[in-house]
Image: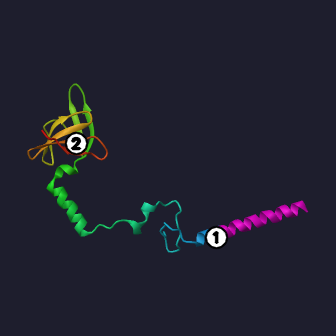
Amino acid sequence: MKIQNLLLSIILIGFMHFAATAAYAASPAKNSTPTSSNNLIDPTRPDFADESKKKKKTKANVSKTKRKARKNPISQLKLQQTLISTKRKLATINGKTMTLGQQIRGAKLLSIDNDFVELFYRGKRYTLDLTFPSAIKEVKR
């Protein structure tokens, strides 16, 4: 009698689990996107991966960004690393390793320090910090 009750309980629990799983799979998730024609949903997919929530780039937004980049190419520069030894000083900006006096996008490299470099562009001095993202500041003297 105890074995029959135990088997009946196991079967009942299995059926309840199956029914709950089927009901969950049939209900649409609030923040997910169907991945194929049979509406499979990835429960581990983060919200930011949802294509419908992404901000669409319009031609006006893209052209405004391009205009800003053309206006001041210094804003596009990213300081990635510096190397200072007794014999030389190097800075890597946008993947290009540079020494003092070299130019990138019209800006001349004036000095290299442990965590920043100084650039000269169109009569003004700028510091480019070794942070994420690179901070660019005009030097007031």
User: Which residues, given as a range, are shown in magenta?
Assistant: 1-20
Color encoding of the figure: rainbow
State the separation of the CA atoms marked 1 and 2: 57 Å
Q: Is residue 26 above or below residue 141?
A: below
Q: Residue furthest right?
A: 1
Q: Quadrant of the N terminus?
A: bottom right
Can you tell which mark lies on residue 128? Answer: 2
Q: Is residue 108 above or below residue 31?
A: above
Determine the residue positioned at 13% across, 37% down.
Answer: 101
Tag 1: residue type? Ala
| SS of the residue under disc 2 | strand
Q: Is residue 19 above or below residue 86?
A: below
Can you tell which mark lies on residue 22? Answer: 1
Left or right, 25 with respect to 115, comes to right
| SS of the residue under disc 1 | helix
Q: Residues within 10 Å of mark 1 (few under 14, many from 20)?
A: few
Determine the residue positioned at 49% across, 66% down.
Answer: 32
